[in-house]
Amino acid sequence: MIQLKKSIFYFLVLTLVGCTSQKNVLQKTLASKNPNIKRVMDNVKQHEIQIIYTQIIRDKKGNVSFKDYTYNLDANNYFYPASTIKFPIAILALEKLNTIKNTSVNTEYQIEGNNVKLKFSEEISKVFAVSDNVASTNLFEFIGFDYMNQKMKDKGLSPFRMSHRLSGTNPSSPFVKSTKTFKGDNSVEIFPSKVNQSVIPLDLNGIKKGIGYINGEDKLVNEPFDFSKRNYYPLETLHNTLKRLVFPTVFKEEERFKITEKDREFILFSMQNLPRNAGFDAVEYYDGYCKFFMFGDTKENIPSNIKIYNKVGNAYGTMIDCAYIVDEVNKVEFMLSATIIANKNGIFNDNKYEYDSISLPFLAELGRQLYDRNKKLER
C-alpha cells in the first residue's frame, strides 16, 4: 500500500513537471540568453512584440485540439500587416471561384484594362513562393474589398479590415475593376466593376507611429506616420486563419473556408513550396526568403524533412510570420505567429529598417528554439 502511494506520488510529480515544462515553452524561449532573442526582449516596448505559440494536441483517435500560449497579444495594439494580408486574398479568391460552375484552380481570368490572361494557380503560387505584390493585387481584383471583409467576418475571423492593395497606382481606390472568367465549357462569365464602401479610419493604440515619414515627393514630413486607413489584420485573426486552413474539421461548418479539398491541398502545397521548386532563381530567392522562422537569417537550404506552411510580411519596419511547422521524422508539429518592428530612427518610408540585424535574427532564433524544445517534448 505504501509502495502504491509512492508510485502515485511520483506519477503526479512527473505529470506536473511535464505540464509545467510544456506550459513554459514560450516563456523559457523568450528568456533565452541568446543575443538574437535577448537584444529584442530587453527592448520589448520599442519592438512592439506580439507572439502566439500553439501546441497541436492529437488524441488516440487522431482528433486535434489546440493549446495556445501568447506574449503581449492585443488586437488593440496596431501593427501594419504587410503581405500577410495576401493569405486570405488567395484563399477567398478560390472560395469565390468555387461558386462558379466549370472552373478550377487552373481557370484563366482577365482583368479590365489588361489583355493578359491570368491563371489562378500561377498567381497563388507567386503569392506564397516570393510574396509577389502584383499577383496578390490580380487575385484581389477578382474579389474586392466588400466581399473580402464580409467573408472574413462571416467566418468569425475578426477584427479584420482590407482597405488598400499592395500594388498599383491608386491602391486605396474603392473602385474594383470588372473581370472575365474563362470557364471549362468555353463560356465566359463577367463580374462587373464595383465601387466598394468607403474606408472608416481606425482608432487603435499605435495607429500613428514614429516621428516622421518620407512622403510621395521624397520629402521628410516631421510628424508621425498615420496608418488609420491601412489594412488591419491582428495577429490572433491571422493565426486563426491558418488554423482554419490546416485543420478545418476542428471548426464549425460556417467558420470554414468553402473550398474543395483539392483547392485546400493546393494552397497548402503552395505555402510550403520553396522558390527554387516554384521556378524562381535560387540565389535571389533562397529557401529562407519567405521563411522567417528558423531560416530567415541564413541562405542555406532547408532540410527536406522540415515543412513550413506559412505567410510572411515585411514593410515599414514591421516583420510578421505566421507558420505551421512540421517535421515528421522528429515528430515535431506546432504553430507560431509573431510580429516585430525595428525602426531605430523613427522615420517611416525611408527604407532604413533593422530587418537584417534585429528582426530576422529574432524570428529565426525564436523558431529554432521552439523547434528544438518541441523535439524534446513527449508525444
Image (tube, helix red, strand yellow):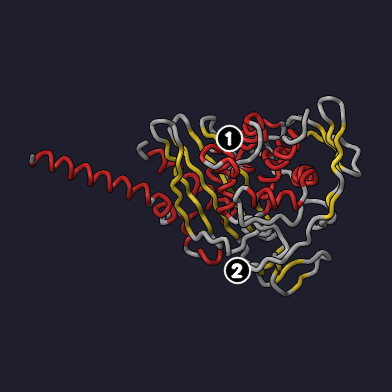
| Alpha carbon separation for disc pair 2 and 1 | 39 Å
| Residue at horizontal 80 percent and vertical 46 percent from the top | 141
Near-viewer residue (203 or 274): 203
Label 2 secondary element: loop
Near-viewer residue (95 or 133): 95
User: What amino acid type should be assigned to the residue bearing mark 2?
Assistant: Asn
Among the 4 quarters of the image, the one containing residue 47: bottom right
Left or right position of 339 against 7: right
| Residue at horizontal 60 percent and vertical 43 percent from the top | 254
- Residue 295 visible in the displayed image: no
Pointer 2 residue:
205
Dot placed on the residue nearer the N-terminal end, 2 or 1 = 2
The spot of residue 25 in percent (x, y) is 40, 49
User: What amino acid type should be assigned to the residue bearing mark 1?
Assistant: Asn
Left or right position of 113 against 305: right
The spot of residue 304 in percent (x, y) is 54, 30
* Category of crowding for the residue at label 2, using alpha-carbon neighbours closer than 10 angstroms: few (below 14), some (14–19), many (at least 20): few
Give the vertical position of 164 relative to 378 (above or below): below
Among the 4 quarters of the image, the one containing residue 270: top right
Pointer 1 residue:
301
